[in-house]
Image: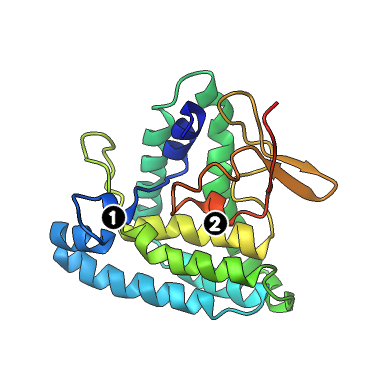
Amino acid sequence: MTAMTAVFSRVTATAVNARQINGRLSVYSYWKEFDPITAEDEAGAIHQMARRMAAAVTKGDLGLLLAEEVSRYSLMDLQIIGGRLHAEIIRLPEPYRKQVHPFITEQLFGAHHQLLAMHRSGRFRSMTEPITDRATFVEFCNMIPDGCFRRDESPERIPFRNTPRHRAFYYLVSAFTIFVLDRPGHPVGMPFPGGFRVEEHNGSFYCLIRDREKDVPFSICNFCPALQTEDG
């Protein structure tokens, strides 16, 4: 992994491989040992959520389901998610931190607002077209449970506990952007270290990072509709 990708991975909440956590074969096993009550409750809810998502056929069906799920997050939940996002951003070096900050905020909370606004307006009920790439969508849904239960960083590093439920929020919002709106998981114009950006040309999206996150199995880049661009 390049230095650029390593920095970017911290920002986008990428994960460690489930088989590399203290020699255990399951990320869920680690979390269950750490907090058994939370694990039992959250594991069932997250698996059920992922199964319901995978059963969606149209973009409208998926939008309605995602809106229902994100509506379960309280103001305190959103404050925790926002606090953690801020803690990640301030660790980035300037001037990159200032450049990327509005795009990361838009990626998470801008999309969250748009999802709920479309739900309230009834927009999803008229979206009868099928999900564009169903095979990739199902792979995304199957990835969510393990992605949510990957090992968290120590509280000394990030002073906001990132529970599996909080990670699920990230995947819910990403599913809306990628599979309902057919847009890249990271906003057009978002900069990467090195001066590269997510770009849009004639209705197609391009990203330098698109194929460089394959060693990170829970990265949303692996499911993004953007096309890979070359260096330069």
The quadrant in which residue 194 appears is: top right
The quadrant in which residue 115 appears is: bottom right
The quadrant in which residue 57 appears is: bottom right
Please tell me which residue lies in front, 48 or 21: 21
Can residue 109 be spotted in the picture? no
Q: Locate residue 69 relative to residue 38 in the image: left or right.
A: right
Q: Which mark is residue 174?
A: 2
Q: Locate residue 59 relative to residue 38 in the image: left or right.
A: right
Q: Locate residue 69 relative to residue 196 in the image: left or right.
A: left
Q: Looking at the figure, which quarter contains the C terminus?
A: top right
Q: Position of residue 210 (x, y in %)?
A: 60, 45
Query: What colour scheme was applied to this rendering of the protein?
Result: rainbow
The residue type indicated by label 1 comes to Arg
Please tell me which residue lies in front, 72 or 213: 213
Disc 2 to disc 1, how far (Cα)? 25 Å
Q: Position of residue 130 (x, y in %)?
A: 70, 76
Against 163, residue 197 (above or below) is: above
Label 2 sits on a secondary structure element that is helix
Tell me which numbered mark, 2 or 1, is placed earlier along the sequence.
Answer: 1
Q: Position of residue 187 (x, y in %)?
A: 64, 44
Against 90, residue 177 (above or below) is: below
Residue furthest top in the image: 94
Against 197, residue 187 (above or below) is: below
Against 33, residue 91 (above or below) is: above
Residues at discs 2 and 1 in contact (Cβ within 8 Å): no
Q: Which residue in the structure is indicated by mark 1?
A: 19
Q: Locate residue 181 relative to residue 14 in the image: left or right.
A: right
Identify the residue shown where x is 50% and y is 34%: 5
Identify the residue shown where x is 25% and y is 72%: 41
